[in-house]
Image (spheres, helix red, strand yellow):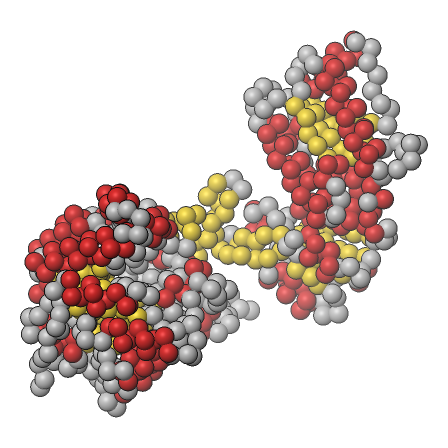
Amino acid sequence: MSEYKSGSNLEKILKAGHFAFTGECGPPLGANVEHLKEKAGHLKGCVDAVNVTDNQTAVVRMSSWAASLVLLQEGLEPNFQMVCRDRNRLAIQSDILGVYSHGIKNMLCLSGDHQRFGNHPEAKNVFDIDSMQLIHTVKTMRDEGTFLNGQDIDGPPELFIGAASNPFAEPFEFRVHRLAKKIAVGADFIQTQCIYNMDRFREFMKRAVDMGLHEKCFILAGVTPMKSVGMARYMAKQVPGMDVPASLIKRLQGAGKGKVAGEGIKFAVEQIEEFKEMEGVAGVHLMAIEWEHRVPEISKLAGMLPRPKV
Amino acid sequence: MSDNFKPKIVAFYCSNCASSAANVADGMNKVLPENIKMVQVPCTGRLEILHLLKPFEEGADGVYVAGCQEDSCQYVTGITKATKRVAHVKKILEQLDIAPERIDIFNLSAGRGQAFVDVASEMNDRIKELGPLLSE
Amino acid sequence: MIVAEQKPITEILEMVKEFTKILVLGCKGCVTVCNVGGSKEAAILASTLKIATRKTNKKIEVAAHTLERQCDPEYVDEVKDRIDDYDAVISIACGVGPQFLSERYPSARIFPGVNTKFMGGAVEHGMWSERCAGCGTCVIHHFGGLCPISRCSKSLLNGPCGGSSNGKCEISKDVDCIWDMIVKKMTELGRLEELLEFVPPKSWITARDGGPRRLIREELVI
């Protein structure tokens, strides 16, 4: 019996005790995959696996599974994402089998932003199951080899199961319990929402470590480099569940014209250095959406290169 | 809009501030336009949406409500309620493609006899300007 | 109660523009309680329709009548002798009313005068809030008496999601995050561990997802 659940690159790296480094990529707003391939090119060799978002912010893009296949073809390991907003349990189980059969090994289970946010707000809501139940579904299919109704699967999907955690959403005290619940239900690895408030995150990790969660599951800290003061302000005010300290905004303002992006990267690199030493943190998830061309630079500055081979 | 147009206006006025004002006006020998039908109510808060619509249904060209100031309504919230209902009727009129200015509400004080008369003249002039309801 | 909202008057006028004898039918049930379809509102709508014709110079006849309920055949029957006097009927009851009327009076032109919204209650005078989505399997007692199916935008059973902010749902500041309320309440009640138990996928068979529903009470059927 293999010691690996999926044998994916990400799983191997984490289980070997290396500090993992994952990236992210958004699928195209159409069937044209040229830009997607370009982004993949920047990320190749810099990260262990790449998240492929699923109609993120409820804006219709190419499906995560399809874009994930493109990434596979380009020689990268995708972290296929599925949200609960758009599919019922039939389509969910169906797609899980489909992606696995094509060589996808990592899957992230998410709730999904409500469609009211997105570009098709009149759509019917699905949410047949929630993200917790989705984790449980994938685990059932993988470890029990059955569908949700108990029927046997001819060729169970051996996926490495991921989930998201937002240490900054409310109610704050409950977030670590929710993380524990996701792990208990079957999450193999967790990626957090992007972190800016380091104090609060340290507190969160302390609680997670106290509960022994880091021993049951690999926790990756989310990092999104700030490109501009405008971006920092926007995230502070408009994005739910985001905690951007005023001190960071001040720091970015103080960098001077034309130097803000550089300062943002500096802060991100400092964060990564701290995460490397932080107890319970098994890696970093870098979300540099539409900034993929800066990932090689960030990876280098943060001492992430070369990526380990297991 | 001929000069001969005599608008049919219905005015609802409360038996407190507005009524006192009316009495003062009377004492000053002020004359109100005869095309305005005056209807006294215990409090403008008693006016329902239907009361405000009925005059229009039955041929009025304009309707107005005269009551107390917001902070000195005898029955405390009467004028506030009346104000909301008048606003609602304005919306109905708009949806019917009828000028919402054909209905309005005024806050008077007990001793302001001249104001009572002025309000009547204002509505009279306004409705004359707008013309008969049919012509819109 | 079932909460409804009046259709815009322009829409109602458009519906009945070719008709000259209109009956407005109100209901003394839920729609009276939420001030949209009772006898008052029936009179207001009738008056509004008549005022509308002052602009068009059309001659119309409008009557208003309010039934005890429009969801019981015996009350719907009450208008059988007068309904043929009209060429259009506007029902301002909830969605059930115009349908029951249509079934009982197949040749009558029945129009819905309101948009039925949700099952809810009054939270303030003039304000109603959704409480029940009719999922068919009530489990509010597991969530401190609060319903995550109807009140969570994502109907999460293992909530909250990461979008909850200052006790509000990510979709709007006007929507409370019910999971924030559930966690707080269960904490106050000393029952937080119950929320750590995994709630498995819900069966939606008893909800509208399972198809149009019917309920038969054998002990009541004659």
Above or below, A110 relative to C49: below
Residue A13 relative to residue A191: left or right: left
Residue at image point 38% right, 54% down: C170
Q: Residue at x 81, y 28 (%)?
A: B124
Residue C188 locus on image (x, y percent): 24, 45
Name the quadrant of the N terminus of chain B. top right
How many marks overall?
Answer: 0
For the point 67% across and 20% down, the residue is B108
Q: Please state if B3 lies on the left or on the right of A233 as rendered.
A: right
Measuring from the top left, give residue C49's x and y in whole percent. Answer: 76, 50
The x, y position of residue B128, in whole percent, is 84, 33
Residue C215 is left or right of residue A149, and the answer is right
Depth check, front residue: B82 or B100: B100
- Say which quarter of the image contains residue B64: top right
Judged from this view, the residue extending furthest toward the bottom is: A154
Nearer to the camera, C98 or A293: A293
- Residue at (28, 64) in percent of width and height: A288
Q: Is B95 drawn above or below residue B20 in the view shown? A: below
Which quadrant of the rendered structure holds the C terminus of chain B?
top right
Work out whether residue C219 can be spotted. no
